[in-house]
Each structure stands twice: as structure tokens, then as C-alpha cells.
Amino acid sequence: MSDVPAGSSEAAAPAAPPARLTVEDLKSWLRVTASRIAERADELTELDAAIGDADHGANMRRGMAAVVKAIDAANGADGAPALDTADALLKKTGMTLVSSVGGASGPLYGTFFMRMGASQAGATELGAGALASAIDAGVAGIVARGKAGAGEKTMLDAWYPALEALRAEGEDLAAATAAAASAAAEGRDATEPMIATKGRASYLGERSQGHIDPGAASTAIILGALADVVAGTAEAPGAEVTAAEEPVAKAARPQETGTAGTAAAVEPPDPAPSPDSEEKGSGAADSGAAVGIVLVSHSRALAEAARELATGLMSSVSAPIEIAAGLPDGGLGTDAGAVAAAIERLAARPGNRGVLVVADLGSGIMSAEAALERLGPDTASRARLSPAPFVEGLIGAYGAAGIGLELEAVAAEAAKAAPAKAAQISGA
Ligand code: ADP
Ligand code: MG
């Protein structure tokens, strides 16, 4: 079916569904996916605003537009590789997504397509069985990259049922892809009551319940496009996605998430850095009834950037952060007096649930320990120094404090950060 109809098939009697997907069909699939993702980017972003950082729609639209651009460029002219086998096309798709998406979904979908392609070396057509094996390999790639399993409220909760449905239909490509698309849509809807335990949404714990996972929603779009291309009912891909959209990498973009807490993360830098602690409440309400966090670093710039990272990554939660970092003259160093004052200010806030101190290294730890020793017994009993690494510990602590957990649990989340990072690194 290299001649997939460009328009709706409603008027014409649909041709018999193809038994095999050609490379042209795979390209149509990617183009239709790009078009539908672009159309529904706002919807995906809204889902991500509820439990993440409101960028999934923009991430996916940018990534799929780059894929379409790569396909357009791959006409064999100008030395561009022709992408005339399934593995060349799918690997190129994966590499393009990895380098253009920005969020977690970039490496996850990127690995999916790369592994899907690698499983079909040299193939120019895929029957239903080969498609199921290719998707199986891709899903194994998502698992290898993200270390998630079923029921953790991720895109896998759409991929797993889809794969099962593909397998169950045997060699009938149209029936198999249609069943996979409906299973993915059901899997997407089934993520709503789940509590996220992987990805950014896991920072919200139980507050992630009641929302559909954005990655599961984009997976359902991808599989819906595949079924419609196979059935010959896919619309012509919109022309707009062939344009280079949003070529700016995520890291280089200004804060643009637009959710309530984001404003706090774009606060202008303090023009006159001082070692005095500075309160950081992010935009969301009730930050008083939370564990407070003191950041102790040799570098004020590092502490401010770490705070911005935490509040920016978790814009839908809030906990007070104070900074005790750097020397009065702007140099590198820490000051136990400033740390103690920061702890006391946080402990005095109404509803305070304790204070976790996260320090960078060396004398930062010594200053923090010295500060804890000079606190009055009441405050000292509610303050704790975390052994966690600075950035990872802060992120774990901020997410836990932001959902109102007690000091023990906040300290435990921070301490888990280093082993969680090690586990994320393949083979660690
Ligand atoms: P980010 O979370 O970095 O902002 P996106 O918003 O683009 O990235 O993508 C978020 C989606 O990625 C989630 O909705 C979820 O489906 C998926 N995701 C995140 N982490 C994992 C993981 N470890 N395993 C599988 N999928 C994940
Ligand atoms: Mg996101």
C-alpha cells in the first residue's frame, strides 16, 4: 500500500487493507502522527500541566516536525541518505527525536524507534507479525531507558496493552493495528486513577491521581495514526508540520510553562548576593505547612540555580527554600551563622514541619553541622542534615516537601536520590 490515499476514504470504497507495511506506509504513519500531534499539542500540554511541567505537547510537536523534515530531506539528493528501508527510516526517526525533543519523552520515544528499526535490519516491508516484533523491541527500549513497568502511569500503560492486542490478532495487519489503537486508547484512559511512580509526575505522589498521563495520550495518537494509515482512512498530513517548528532546544528556551508556580522560577537574580538566607516560596498556595529546605553551598550562584531547577521542574508543588551560600564579598564559602539563621527562620514559619538542610560538600557540610549544633533544642529536634548529593537531594526533598510530607519522609526521599540515579544508569 505504498499509495496510501492522501484524503479521507469516506467517499471512495476503501481498498482491501494491505497485508504488509511498506517503507512509504511507515513514512505516512510518521507524517500523520506529526500532523495529529501538532493539532493536539495543546491538549497534551494541558495534561502535562496537571502532573508535569506543561511541555509534552511542545516537545512532541517539535520532535515530530523534525522527523518530517528529516523524511523530506531524505530524498537521496544532496548526499542525504535515502531512508529506503524500515530500519534506516525508524533509526533516523529515533535519533531525530532524541536530539530534538528535550523532555524525558525524547530519549524514551527515541529509543523506541531506534530499537524498533534495529529489530528489522534491511526490511522493506513489515507484516503484522514483524510489526508486533518491532514494537515489542521498541517497548523493551522504553523499559531499558526509563526502568518503568506496567501500572506506573507512563506511556508504557498504553504500549503494553497495544502490544498484547497486536499479538492477539495474528497476521491480519488491519485488524491488528486497529485493535492496538483501541487498546492504547483504553490504556491511556486507565492511567487516570493511577499514582505515578516514575517520571516527573511521581514527584506529586498521590496528587498525580485523577489525571491522564500525557505520554500515554501521545502513544495513543501514534497508534491511532498507524491504524488509520493501514486502513486507508488517515487524513492528509497538515502542511504546517513540514515547516521547521520550534527548533530551539528545551534547555535553551525561557521558562514558558505558564502554570501557577512558574513565576517563582523566573525571579530576577539577586543583584547584590549576600550570604544571608533568602526565602523562596514558589507560586502555589500553602507553602507554610511544609518542611522547609535550606540550601548550603559554597556558591550562591549554584544554590540559586539549583533552587530554580527544583521549582521549575516541579512547578505544581511548593515548599519554602532558603539559601545560605557564598561569602558576603561574593566569593566562594559557607557560613554556619547564616545556615543557623536560615534554619531558624524556616522553623518559625506557621505550620512548619521541620527543616532539611541540603549541603554541597566539604566545609559546606561542616558549616551545616556547626549550625545544627548551635540551634536551640526545640529547633534542633526539627532540623536534619541530609547526606544526599546536592542537586538530586534537593529535587527529591522539594517534591516530597511540596506535597506536604513529614520531615522523615522528606529526608528519606532526598536520601533515595543517589541510589535512584545509579539505578537509572544502564548496567549500574
Ligand atoms: P518531561 O517529563 O521530561 O517534561 P515530557 O513531558 O515530554 O518529558 O514527557 C512526559 C511523559 O514521559 C510522561 O507522561 C510519561 O508517559 C513518560 N515518562 C516519563 N518518565 C518515564 C519513564 N521512566 N518510563 C516511561 N515513560 C516515562
Ligand atoms: Mg513534561
Image (tube, grey):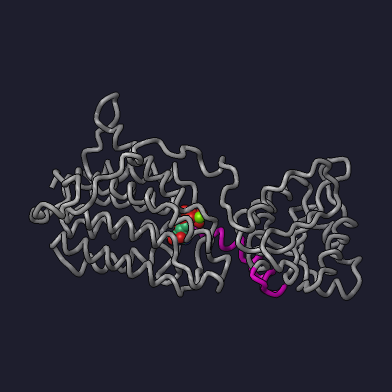
* Residue 187 % position (x, y): 35, 69
Name the residue rendered at 73%, 72% in the picture: 289
- In the foreground, 162 or 8: 8
Report the front residue among 150 and 173: 173
Which image quarter: residue 217? bottom left
Residue 151 appears left or right of 227 = right
* Whole-percent x, y for residue 28 in the image: 24, 46
Residue 418 is covered by the magenta coloring:
yes
Residue 298 in sight here:
yes
Q: Is residue 133 left or right of residue 190?
A: left
User: Magenta segment, principal secondary structure?
Assistant: helix
Q: Image height check: is 415 above or below 425?
A: below
Q: Does the magenta segment cover residue 401?
A: no
Residue plotted at (47% across, 68% down)? 211
Magenta residues span 403-428
Tell me if residue 408 comes above or below residue 24 in the rendering.
below
| Residue 125 position within the rendered picture, expressed as x and y whole percent measured from the top left | 16, 48
Position of 85 relative to 400 (above/below): above
* Residue drawn 72% across the image and 66% down it: 287
